[in-house]
Amino acid sequence: EASDVAMLICYLVVTVLLYGLFREGGRQCSAIAAVFSITGIAILGATGIFHLAPIALLETGLPQVQRAMLIALSLKLHGDLYNVSLIFFGMYCLLIGLVAMRSGRVPMLVAALMILGGACHLVTKMMLITAPEFAHAIPRLFNVMPLIGEAALAGWLIVFGVYQKEIEPRTA
């Protein structure tokens, strides 16, 4: 669980950094993206309860069959809530891609990959929730696109930073 807490803290830091970096691409849109991210983080934090529950259930005096059923249910709820958090993360990626594109601080291709990755998260995770029987028909590429978009943005920022906008001189 310590690694999950560290991940959530890093996720919050990235949210704040990307808000600051791309807010000139649309202050309101960037703020809405941050709200989606923070909501996803809160949901991910809540999933920790279902991730820890099996350990607590092992120590109960319940019959083994009941414990096994409750442990399986707990792990299923963890996975389901994790998918819900990825819907919020998908909206976040889509919006961050949009404000990144509008800001002109990263190449259009990098921003477009973030938008595409966010859209793929939304499609795949909504399918898992609304039509799980058809979710298997989603091409694997849809599950990889969010990673490609995130890697493109992170890689660009690490290697090249952001395009610096020239500051226009103020006239008196």
Image: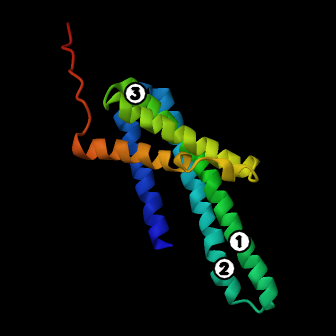
Q: Residue furthest top?
A: 172
Give me the residue at 29% from left, 41% from top. Answer: 156
Q: Secondary structure at mark 2?
A: helix
Q: State the image coordinates of residue 64 (x, y, percent, origin top left).
A: 77, 90
Q: Residue 54 has which mark?
A: 2
Mark yes or no: residue 116 visible: yes
- Of the image marks 1 and 3, the number of the one nearer the N terminus: 1
Q: CA distance from mark 1 to mark 3?
A: 40 Å
**Amino acid bearing label 1:** Ser
Q: Where is mark 1, residue-wise?
A: 74
Give me the residue at 34% from left, 36% from top. Answer: 21
- Of the image marks 3 and 2, the number of the one nearer the N terminus: 2
Q: Please name the colour scheme applied to the rendered image.
A: rainbow
**Amino acid bearing label 3:** Met
User: Horizontally, is 114 left or right of 66 in the view?
Assistant: left
* Pair 3/2: label in front: 3
Q: Is the C-beta separation of discs 2 and 1 under 8 Å?
A: yes
Q: State the image coordinates of residue 41 (x, y, percent, origin top left).
A: 54, 53
**Amino acid bearing label 2:** Pro
Q: Where is mark 3, residue-wise?
A: 101
Q: Is residue 98 above or below residue 132?
A: above
Q: State the image coordinates of residue 120 (x, y, percent, origin top left).
A: 56, 42
Give me the residue at 64% from left, 49% from top. Answer: 125
Say few, some or many: other residues with alpha carbon within 10 Å of mark 3 (under 14 / 14 to 19 / 20 or more): many
Q: Secondary structure at mark 1?
A: helix
- Of the image marks 2 and 1, the number of the one nearer the N terminus: 2
